[in-house]
Amino acid sequence: MALRKIYTFNSLAKLLFLIALTITATPVLGQSLPASAPPPDQYCPSNTPGQCFKSFKAAENAMRAAEPNGGQFLKLKDQSPEQLPSTVRYNYSVPDQVLDSYGASLYGIDYGGVIGGDGYCPVSLATEDRPTEWGGSFCYDEAEMISTFAAKPKGCGGRSCYTHDYVVEGSYILPYSEVSAHQYTRWVPPITVNGPNEGWLEHVGKEITWQETYNDGDHETYSFSARLLKIQRFVCPAGLTPIATDDTSINPKLCRSPALANISVARSQVCSDCVGHPSIPATGDKYRAEVDFNFAGRAFTRYYHSLRQLAPEVGRLGAGWTHTFSAWMGQPNYLPKMMTDEGHLVPYLLVGIGHLVISRPPTAAASTIDQQSDGSWRTVEPNGRVSVFASTGQLLSMEDPDNAANNVVMTYDTRARLSKVTDATGRFLQFVYDTSDYLIGVQLPDGQLVSYNYDANQNLASVDYGNGQVKQYLYGETALAPNGDAGLLTGIVSEDGQRYGSFGYDEYGRVVSSVLHDGSGTTESTEVTYPDATHAAVRTMTGEVRNYTFGADRQVRSIASGSVVETTVFDTYGYGRVASHTDRRGVETQFYYNGDFQRAEVVEAANDSSGAKRTLQTDWDQASRRPSEVRRLNASDGLVAKTNWTYNARGQVLTNTRTDPLSSSTRTSSAVYCEPSDVTANSCPVVGLLRSTDGARTDATDNTTFAYYASDDATCASSPTTCPHRKGDLWKATNALGHITETMAYDGTGRPIKVKDPNGVITEMTYH
């Protein structure tokens, strides 16, 4: 199956319809938007010293124009994560190119120790073309050469003989036997035979045979042969040189350039407030999340950023795209930042030996990172989810403390590409790549293949879900990307063939519009302008204009709509932590942190004196990095509610205790999990699975127990995509009354398809 293909529209009419739909989107009425100001000259090509440009496309054009060795062919190669912390470097090289044209074919005969055509082609002797190794000439006319050679007497070792039965056998090896990049000269004009951009295709495999019969003695007859040679000149594009090789797999890309160039720009692809499905006004970035399927309790999501400043180290999805399993961790002593799966660059700080914290988290509390004894790094998110990264930065595993069946482990191939993601039940995703390391497919556990296809500019052009369900992505449409940047996502066509989204940019590549469509027209619309370096204006579908003010870190300081202002104050230490936020009603919330940058106290309505103030205090369990106690206080700092948690070594909740401050009474619920000793005793199949829960009631039994399939179904070995259950799948859940719900079968992806309730009623399910 050919997975990688160039996407084309089915018809010109369809293309024209889509473009017409794009450019005729209904404009939003309401408050006027301020005009945009040009950005600074920020994109700096390596081969235009002292000259920078306002847009990525302008810098790319200048870089190509300045490169003499095939600059028009320069293509983006990578944005390696191992770069300066504050700078992005887009690295370019010239892929091997197809030759431009062929010259005349030359022919020679290898006879008598001399390869050439002298004496065999008086009419077509190539006296002004490539010389032979002996300084002679080849022939232009193979037929003349062969016939003249056959007619000429042979030496016969000084004896009298005659020759006969000349036969040409074999054929020239195609496309070539060897490619020569040698530059030939002659002793007589023209001195120069081929320029540096011209090479030679050399072909062997053909020969001429004949018989020689002596006229004296016993009139014995002997067989002889001579090798024939064909040579053909070819011309590479200007600035490129031929590749000397005998590798036919690279044909016809026989031309190479040494050109290397890059474009540098300050990093700006950071997490900030998003608007409009969504766009990031702080940076002019168009951001888009697209879900392809679900696996191990997670959506496999692709994320696009029009800034295209980050990319997976290997296994690309086209410029600007990352995915759920492409997170990468920079080395603390070189690049102290993490590329999240969403394509954001998040900095972290060293706060202890082998202990780091995310200093500007996109979530409500900080994530922590701890170095393990094997050199790997363990990251714990505020919700308790764990990711482990290798010392080289690769994502190794992900753990879900709330459901161990959703734990996954990554496998990489010899080229460091993600090849497999396996969950705790043994189901897995298989990743497929082309020879250029682009992701071209993901095979799901049920055998379904999701295919990724690319256009000529290496943009992700479509995703094929099978059964005729194809989602298409459009780039660089003239009406929406006026600067000609072919990497800007301008539209999405959904699986039903209808245009779903249109995204517009200004001449500098900043997103200025984001529109969603349905069959009847525009359903949502957002417009953005950029009055100066620290402000952006956003007009919503209702016509409201919101004016954003940003700091140097591109985080939002204020949002104003008319006389209504929303403000955010960050700490004074430069860590990017929110110190306070005042909403549109003027209500202020204050934030305080512990030494691990976790939110230790949140004061709501801090500026209120009427009794509305509330305080939320959090103590954190330093082993699991999850809350151990949360206290809610009233305006008088009196305790209103308290909740405590305890955890096991895996960060799973063991007990949850709620305390009534008035009566000091407590209500505790608890959980028991599958431990290594249980697995050894064959009483539970997978460490971390929930075995039972015991509710908070003390006056009645309120426990629930869970049983799991202890092994794969017998058919899993022969039919892995359709076997009814795997080791670790939930089998039975028994409530406090002894009522049993049994999951009798799962589909290939792990979804229940046959369930029996406590009354014995069986329900069968299918999924679309």
Image (cartoon, rainbow, N blue to C red):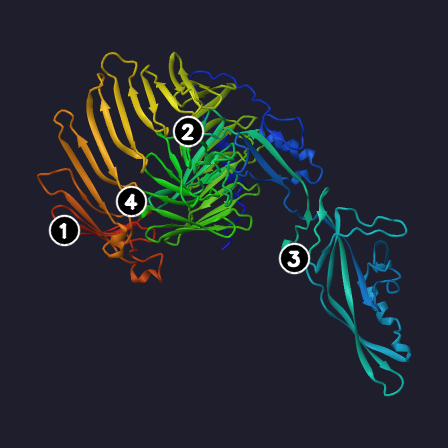
User: In the rendered image, is residue 711 in sight?
Assistant: yes
Sequence-wise, the earlier of marks 2 and 3 is: 3
> Is label 2 or label 3 in front?
2
331 to the left or right of 246: left
The total of numbered circles placed on residues is 4
Sequence-wise, the earlier of marks 3 and 1 is: 3
Sequence-wise, the earlier of marks 1 and 2 is: 2
Q: Say if mark 3 contacts mark 1, CB within 8 Å.
A: no
**Residue indicated by mark 2:** 359
Q: Say if mark 1 contacts mark 2, CB within 8 Å.
A: no
Q: Amino acid at mark 3?
A: Thr
Q: Amino acid at mark 2?
A: Ser
> Is label 3 or label 1 in front?
3
> Is label 1 or label 2 in front?
2
**Residue indicated by mark 1:** 759
450 to the left or right of 711: right
**Residue indicated by mark 3:** 248
Specify the quadrant of the image occupied by residue 360.
Answer: top left
Please, what secondary structure does the residue beneath circle 2 have?
A: loop
Label 2 neighbour load within 10 Å: few <14, some 14-19, many 20+: many
Residue 493 point in image, percent of width and height:
45, 38
Query: How far apart in space, not on screen, are marks 4 and 1 (Cα)?
Result: 27 Å
**Residue indicated by mark 4:** 403
Q: Amino acid at mark 1?
A: Asn
